[in-house]
Amino acid sequence: MNQANKVVVTCALTGLLTDPAKFNVPVTPAEMADAAEQSHDAGASVLHCHFRDQREGMGAFPTWDLASVGNILAAIKQRVPGIIICMSTGVLGDDISGPVGCLEAYKPELAACNAGSLNYLKIRQDGSWAWPPALFDNPVEKVKRFLDVMTAHNIIPEFECFDTGIVRSVGMYKANAMFEGEPHVSFVMGVDSGMPANPDLLPILKEELVADSHWQVIATGPGREKIWNLHRRCLELGGDVRTGLEDTFYLPDGERATTNGQLIEALVKIARDVGREPATTDEARDILGISRK
């Protein structure tokens, strides 16, 4: 099978705030390493990593503590030496010292770069807010600060785009020379106040990409059929894919997933159904333009 038929599969291991007391998300270095190995064995070549507070009883909360992050990364790399790390960087507000410190210390091959702002909303059936309305603020100045650090450390930005205008903004960042190389774009679909998990949107979104962009779908939110149909359409159109306990808890048959490996296995099965094969880590580096370190 030639490289055109290969797909880069990413596993999003744990997410930002999912409570490990209620959901089986990995938190400790050993749990993250186990999840990484299961995901890699099932076909993932990239891990999207959030990092959790390692203090007892605090595992539902994120951390940028350098020692904690380093311990998690070391455990993953010891278990799966060749895996590609995509480090999360998302924070509210102007203080980005936490993620920047981790980028500078550990220099992952990829890092998420939230490419625009979004009113992050969710409504209950009775019309009340599920949480206080929040602004996920990513103005151009903040995006540029992240991109400057990534450029300095040879880290490829993976632009997370929650809406169509944010997808188009990535082309403006490229035209403004805010980053180098081919754009890597994630269509984040299914957040209630962002783009819906609608497969019919994918051809439109593709049309808005800069030439030679790499793209993938991050399918999240309620409605398992929508999520898995979106993955299938993405694969048919030549995109890369991501799943994991950060993005969904449900398998295509409606059963609840208990491990990241189960979700990756389900995604790889769909990829093979449409004639595509998961890329190895070496193949993924070639596809994504990651230089060997």
Image (cartoon, rainbow, N blue to C red):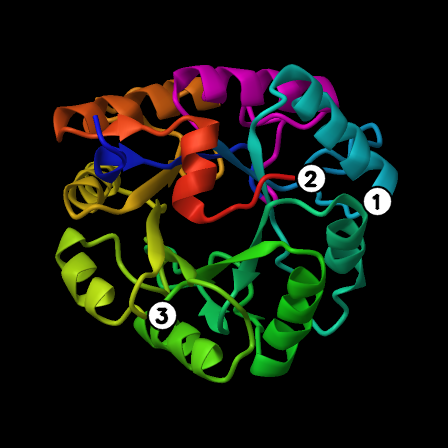
Which secondary structure, mark 3? Answer: helix
Give the percent coordinates (x, y) of residue 181: 48, 64
**Sequence order check, earlier mark of 3 and 2:** 2
Q: What amino acid is found at the position of numbered circle 1 in the picture? A: Asp
Visible in this render: residue 17? yes
What residue range appears in magenta? 16-44
**Residue 33, numbered circle:** none
In the displayed structure image, the side of residue 45 where residue 197 appears, left or right: left
**Sequence order check, earlier mark of 2 and 1:** 2
Q: Are marks 2 and 1 in contact (CB under 8 Å)?
A: yes
Which secondary structure, mark 1? Answer: loop
Give the percent coordinates (x, y) of residue 183: 42, 63
Q: Label 3 belongs to which residue? A: 167
Q: What amino acid is found at the position of numbered circle 2 in the picture? A: Phe
Give the percent coordinates (x, y) of residue 186: 39, 55
**Separation (CA) of disc 2 from disc 1:** 9 Å
For residue 46: magenta? no
**Separation (CA) of disc 1 from disc 3:** 31 Å
Residue at x 15%, y 61% (from the top left corner): 203
Q: Label 1 belongs to which residue? A: 65
Give the percent coordinates (x, y) of residue 254: 25, 24
Which quadrant: the N terminus? top left
